[in-house]
Every structure is written in C-alpha cells, then in structure tokens.
Image: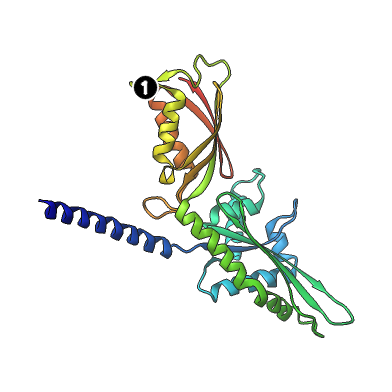
Amino acid sequence: MRIIAFLIIFSFVNLLHAQNEVQADMNKNIQPTIMVIPFAPKGVQLRDAYEKNELVRIAVTKVKEGFDSRGVNTIDLRGKLKQSANTAALQDGQEESDKDDVIRNSGADIYVEVEATKDKSSTGNSATVIMTAYDAFSGESFANKVSTSQKFYTDNFDQLVQKALEKEIENFLNTINSKFNDIVTNGRTVTMNIGIEEGSKFNFESEVGKDGDLLSEAIETWIQAHSFKNYYHIQGITSTKLFFDIVKVPLRDDEGNNFRLSKFAGDFRKYLNNVGLTTSTTYNGNNIVISIKSK
C-alpha cells in the first residue's frame, strides 16, 4: 500500500511539474506587439508630428526597421493614421487626440515614442534619437534611451540616425522584453476606486446576498476570485469608499485575445446586479471608478 501511495503522489507531482513547464513555454511564446510613433507635444496631432518633420519620420521608420530585423511584431503607423482619419470623418464633432485613437485601436501591447534632432557644428554633424516605450494598456513607462551618433562631416542625417540607433536599440529592446515578460508572468496592474452614491440607504458594512456577507467582504471575495493569480491589495476602506490600489489582470483572456478592462468591469457590474445593486463606471487608462447605488 505504501508503494502504491508513493507512486500516486510521485505521478501527481510529475503531472504538476509538466503542467508548469507547459505554462512556462506558453508564456515564453508570448511576444509583444509594438507600434512606433513620433513624439507629439501637447496640442499637436500625431499625424502632424509624423508628416511635418522629415527627420522624425525617418527616425520612426528606422526604429521600426530595427525592431523588424530582430523578429519583433510591429504595427505600421501609416495604416493606423489612415484608419483614424476615416473614423474621425464618421465622428464629426467629437474631439479626441488622434494619438489616443491610434493607440487604442492599434492592438499594440507597447508603443514607442520617438524624437529626433540634428546637431550641426564645425567639427561635424550628429543626430540624437530619444526612444520611450509605454504600456499601451496603462500608459506606464517601460524604457527610455537617448542615443547620439558620432560626429561626421556629412549632411546625410538618415545615416546619422541609423548610427545613433545602432548604439542603443538592442539594449532598449532587451529592457522592453524584460518588462513585458514580467507582465506575462505576473499580470498588469489595475486600480479600482469603488464608492457608494450619496444618499444611499446602505454602505460597505451592509449585509448582501444569501450568506449575509458585508458588502465589502463580498466585493473582496469577488476580486480575489477574478484577479490574476488571486493577487490584489486594498489600500483603504471606509463605510462609503473602497480602494484597491492593486488588482492584477492577465495580458490575454482565455481565448488568447488582449484582455479588455471593460469586460472585467462588466462582469463585476453583473455580480453586483445579482445582489441587488446597480453601478455606473468610468475608465481612465488602467483606473476603474465605480459608483454603487441600490436599484
């Protein structure tokens, strides 16, 4: 009997180990999709930043080519700008930065903003390229590199931009991949600010559901069950406010599509509806703000 029990336990441990290895291999196969865009100062549309500055346009192209040559999945900015223009034509009167529209509809995991400047002098000319990578989901900065080419007696700034990029693009991409791999393993961070609407006859200390849990307890139980690897953290709670400063969500959903914050919030809304509560929800990047009221 001891031998049989040992074999059962041994087989179970091996099965768990094999499952973990499969999951690890799947994680390794998830690669980021990156879109390279020009830096657009406040008040400047992305299209203008791209089309009206030849050096920046060259730099954006060179950075994308550098990623492509290293096997990175990239999204072409020009196609997304055209798509954004078509959308804007159908939504006349709605004010929105085309940068926001392009990033939101790109399907990119990460976007890289590029700046480029010329430096002309009597000792030779050089080009400086600044690259900053952001998480397209949260806007969190992933990596930043400033690279300047050596000085040459040439006016070929295409080549000077290329020289500047050759110095740092590999290190820049390695930093991006490191940050992205951490997201694949540990999930992305969402914050949830949940409040009780003024004048409501209940609060987070009120009992809800068949089990008589406090509303705060019921919400925490739901968040624990639906957060990635059950990881979350409550920063503060009062009778009318509940703030989760960390709720981990996966990079992809069960079908392999990009995880949608609206789906997560929608499932939470349905849960609260089942216990007799209604909500209004707003989003700001990776932040969810929810107001609860009784039906």
Residue at (58, 64) in percent of width and height? 175
Locate residue 6 relative to residue 260 in the image: left or right.
left
Q: Residue 153, position in %: x, y?
A: 82, 85
* Residue 71 vertical placement versus 253 (above, below): below
Q: Indicate the quadrant where residue 12 lies.
A: bottom left
Q: Secondary structure at mark 1?
A: loop
Locate residue 15 relative to residue 33 in the image: left or right.
left
Q: Residue 241, position in %: x, y?
A: 56, 26
Q: Nearer the viewer, residue 203 or 8?
A: 8
The residue at the far left in this view is 1
Residue at (55, 59) in percent of width and height? 179
Residue tagged 1: 209
Q: Indicate the quadrant where residue 84 lies.
A: bottom right
Q: Indicate the quadrant where residue 125 lies.
A: bottom right
The residue at the far front in this view is 2
Residue at (21, 53) in percent of width and height? 9
Q: Residue 190, position in %: x, y?
A: 53, 43
Q: Residue 89, position in %: x, y?
A: 62, 51
Which quadrant: the C terminus? top left
Residue 86 seen from this side = no
Q: Nearer the viewer, residue 256 or 46?
A: 256
Q: Residues within 10 Å of mark 1 (few under 14, many from 20)?
A: few
Residue 156 seen from this side = yes
Locate residue 100 relative to residue 228 in the image: left or right.
right
Residue at (71, 81) in percent of width and height? 159
Q: Please give the count of numbered marks on the rendered protein.
A: 1
Q: Amino acid at mark 1?
A: Gly
* Residue 110 vertical placement versus 124 (above, below): above
* Residue 140 vertical placement versus 36 (above, below): above
